[in-house]
Image (cartoon, grey):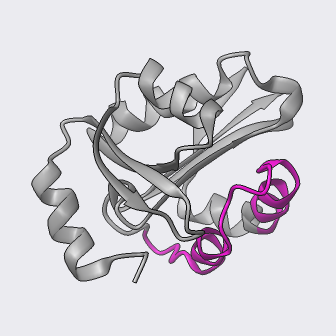
Amino acid sequence: MLTQALTPAQLSRLRNHLIRFSYKYGDKRITHKALRWLKNLNTSPFPKGTYLAIASEEKRLTGFILFGRYGLEEAYIVVHPDFRKRQVGETLFKQTIDTLGRVYVRVACDNIPSLKLCFALGLRAFSFTTGPTGKPTLCLGGGEWSEKEFHSHSQTHSPYK
C-alpha cells in the first residue's frame, strides 16, 4: 500500500473521483454537508489545518482521509470495502495526526468501525452531542488537542446549528 498527501493541484484533478468514491464506499455515513465541503474546498492553498491523503495499491484508490481545520470544520475517512481490516484507515489516520499534530472528529455512536479506529489510535472522547442526522455523537480528540479549542470553535461555528 502506498500513501500520499495530496497537494491542492492534485485535489483539483481528483476531486470528482474522491466525491464519487465517497458516495460509493462511504456506507451512507458521509453527510451531504461534508461532500459539499469537499466539492467547494479552496485549493490555492489549502486552509490552515487542512490535510488530504490517499492510499492506493497498484494505481487503485483504496481509501482517503480529509481534515479541514484539524477536523473542526470537517473530517472523514473512506476505505474501499475490499481493503478494510488491512490497516488502510489506521495508516492514513496516523499520518494525519503526525502531520497536523492534533485532530478532532465527531463520530455517531452507532458507527462502530469508526469508533474502533479512533480508540485504537488513542483518540479520547471528551464530549457528547447530537449529530447532524439527530444521532448521539461522540466528540474525540487526538494528538495535542485541546477541549478549549474545540468548544471555542463549536460556539462560533457549530455545524449542528
Q: On the image, which quarter does residue 53 sit in?
A: top right
Q: On the image, which quarter does residue 114 sit in?
A: top right
Q: How many marks?
A: 0
Q: Nearer the viewer, residue 39 or 155?
A: 155
11 vs 147, left or right, is right
* Above or below 122: residue 96: below
Quarter of the image where the N terminus is located: top right
* Above or below 56: residue 78: below
Residue 117 image position (x, y, % from top left) = 54, 27
Residue drawn at x 52%, y 73% is 43
User: What segment carries the magenta color?
Assistant: 16-45
Is residue 102 covered in magenta? no
Residue 50 image position (x, y, % from top left) = 41, 58
Q: Main secondary structure of the magenta part?
A: helix
Residue drawn at x 50%, y 33% is 93
Residue 71 image position (x, y, % from top left) = 39, 56
Is residue 37 covered in magenta? yes
Quarter of the image where the C terminus is located: bottom left
* Above or below 14: residue 66: above
Residue 36 image position (x, y, % from top left) = 64, 78
Q: On the image, which quarter does residue 134 sit in?
A: bottom right
50 vs 15, left or right, is left
Is there any visible trace of residue 58 in the rendered image?
A: no
